Image (tube, rainbow, N blue to C red):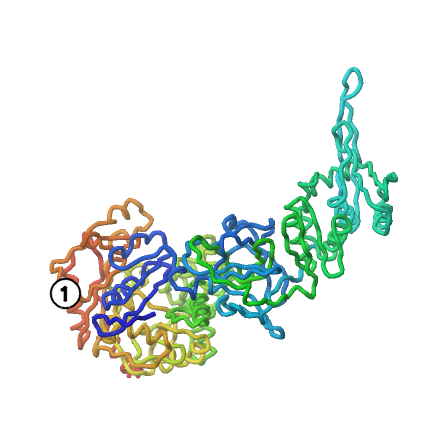
Amino acid sequence: MANNNSNQNGLSPKKFLFVSLESLSGDLAWQLTKEGHEVKAYIKAKSDIDVYNGFIGKVDSWEPHVSWADVICYDKKTEVLTENGWKLFEKLKYQDKIATLNPKNFRLEYHFPDKIIKYKYKGKLIYYQSPENEFCVTPDHQMFVKDYKGGYSFVAAEKIFGNTRKHIKLDCFWQGKSSEEIEVPDCQIKWKSGRQNLERKHIYSGFRIGISHLLAIAGFYISEGAVIRRWRQLNGIRFYQNYGVVLEIFKKILKEANISYRTTRKGKGEEIRIYNGALAKFLVDNFGEGTFNKHVPKWIKKIDNKNLRILYEWLMNGDGHRGRHHDFYSSKSLQLLDDVQEILLKIGLAGRTKKNIISIIKNKNCEPRLKDKKYWKKIDYNDYVYCVEVSNHILYVRKNGKPMWCGNCFDDVEFGEIADKLRRKGKLVIGGSIYTDRLEMDREFGQLEMKKYGINILPQWQFSNYDEAIEFIRKNPERYVFKPGGNTPSTSKGLLFLGEEEDGKDILELLERNKEIWKKKAPVFQLQKYVSGVEVATGAFFNGKDFIMPINVNFEHKKIFPGDIGPMAGEMGTLMFWNRPNNLFIMTLEKMKPALAESGYIGYIDINCIVNSKGIYPLEWTARFGYPTIHIQSEGILTPMGEFLFRLAKGEYFELKTKRGFQLGVRILSPHYFAKNDRELVEMYRDLPILFKKPDNLEGVHIEDIKRVEGVWRIAGESGCLLVITGSGSTVAEAREQAYSRIKNIMIQNMAYRTDIGLKWNTDSDKLQTWGYLY
């Protein structure tokens, strides 16, 4: 993470990797580059492909740049089991169901991939190759292993390199679909005969057959059977078997299934002939014809393990070999060997394929121990690596015919899951956690957690039925706020509506008129009781164990136009100050300290509230850097950002050095912000220059969706959010004066911004002071 050189602040330069869904973090990254740190940024949104060009280094994928700690994939020759059989990772599609292992009960489950991963990798791979097992993975790949007496867990391949005490898993439990009988359909054959070459036909009647009998016949057909043809038409099937128990049992099965047959003595055994075209066609259609073409169809491999065991036993009765220590099955059909390997997995065994033979691993050997160090290598690799993300995080993979259960790549779920995982591996991460992601994204969960930790919340009602909500308002006429609920994507949050009628008639009418549209965009929603007061947020940085002082108090201006008119814009500007813990913080955010510590969260978190003389009513969480909050906070933070972020990620406790007084930020927009779907308008403003009357005076200028081309700042991306201009001062008036004077230095065609950021402080501060929340 660091080297011995010093940057302009006398600090050791660090390396920072930014991973974000959209182009929001670039200004912070730019601040770090100006401090002399090395920065790389990954932005997922394709619409932001040119944002920050010329300001910071960007990468197409983040995984290879997290160093060895996050590169968790397989080499290009590893295969993965799908519902359609074995496939190389590079051949996978999102329509393929992947064989996964449920770690709670060790059951085999098929899941669609959440993500298919491929990227170029140059570095070392961990290669284990013994006669029994084989894998080739990146050093931090998650191996699913256990000690002799312990339970299974994920351990990085690097950490078990050369270890001879770890066991891997080869088997599983499989339930499958149960079935009693199968319908064999009619079969019609046609031929021509006689001097007049007349067409003749015959219909073999279909029949129902017990699944156990069918699978015994099918297994024996695959290994020992061949078709009988008459006039090139399927006429029946034949088997040859030496005298003995197997032959007698097979004839008994045919009798039980009411299938007629004829026998002919040949050498040391008998040939059994079944003249039944319906059965012959069914077997050929489903199990193939010819030594090189036999296989087991997908629908058969879905049945329960009890019946699959019958199929396996009759495969073995033909081309199998049962030895004292090892069993083998041989076939010239490579597809059949793959199918048998899958069947072995589903009946609680495992198998290794090599050329035309599959060696069968019995139950007691299905948790083999990794062997001597001579089987371990670290090899150089410069090619693509692959993986797939599934919900169970365990895949059935094989290399050179040797299968095993092994881990998959973990990727972002609003980045909380990946942040948790990287922290567990000792990586220094500032960002979400699974818990804090849910606090912010799931409104209902966020409110319930507040209540759980003793924070006062507003009355609210959850709905998934719009007609029930309409009836509720009619019976309880009040002023409400409509909020999309559940795991709310950012696109749906824009549907939030603040009712203005005291009897709720405005929201009632909106629900009645829009319910058919809204139920698709917000299937789960809240009605929250409206309460009047001052909207204010309190936040702080959290180091995984405790809050870093001082706290931040901020006042957002969320609507587009001055006077809080128009639609919500997320944020058009903010007034803030740093402070010692006050009643606002103590009665809300401080109560969440145990939950944040338990989740291991490291980063900024704040809680937005409505306050009045009766109490504090929290509304929602922000568990990440706020944008443009962090731009404005950097105006007031005196501690170098690189030092601050590094120490925060390490979990150190320290006190931030901040300016006294107030900081204020104003967001600058381009007209296409108001019409992002107007491609013509977006392209009209793309690449237009951002000019400065005094180019050497860029204090308080923070970048959003812009780029730098040959020294000229230009509009980039599609969002229309261009700059955040900040100012600070001992009073709000001084902070406003500095910020708006800096805006006068900027020349952008038709730029838009609010002119009233901070003006409400005069009245809001009096109320907050009177109610006792500020100090």
Q: How many marks?
A: 1
* Most foreground residue, 613 or 322: 322
Query: In this view of the protein, can residue 425 be seen by the observer?
Result: yes
Q: Which quadrant would residue 621 be assigned to in this image? A: bottom left
Residue 688 spot, x, y in % from top left: 21, 50
User: Does 77 appear above or below 641?
Assistant: above
Q: Amino acid at mark 1?
A: Ser
Q: Which quadrant would residue 7 be assigned to in this image? A: bottom left
657 lies left or right of 743: right
User: Does 179 appear above or below 662?
Assistant: above
Q: For mark 1, give the secondary structure.
A: helix
Residue under pointer 1: 741
Residue 511 spot, x, y in % from top left: 44, 58
* Most foreground residue, 186 or 775: 186
- Residue at 52 percent across and 55 percent down: it is 113
101 lies left or right of 389: right
* Most foreground residue, 321 or 690: 321
- Residue at 66 percent across and 56 percent down: it is 351
Residue 646 spot, x, y in % from top left: 32, 73
483 lies left or right of 282: left
Q: Quadrant of the N terminus?
A: bottom left
Q: Which quadrant would residue 195 be assigned to in this image? A: top right
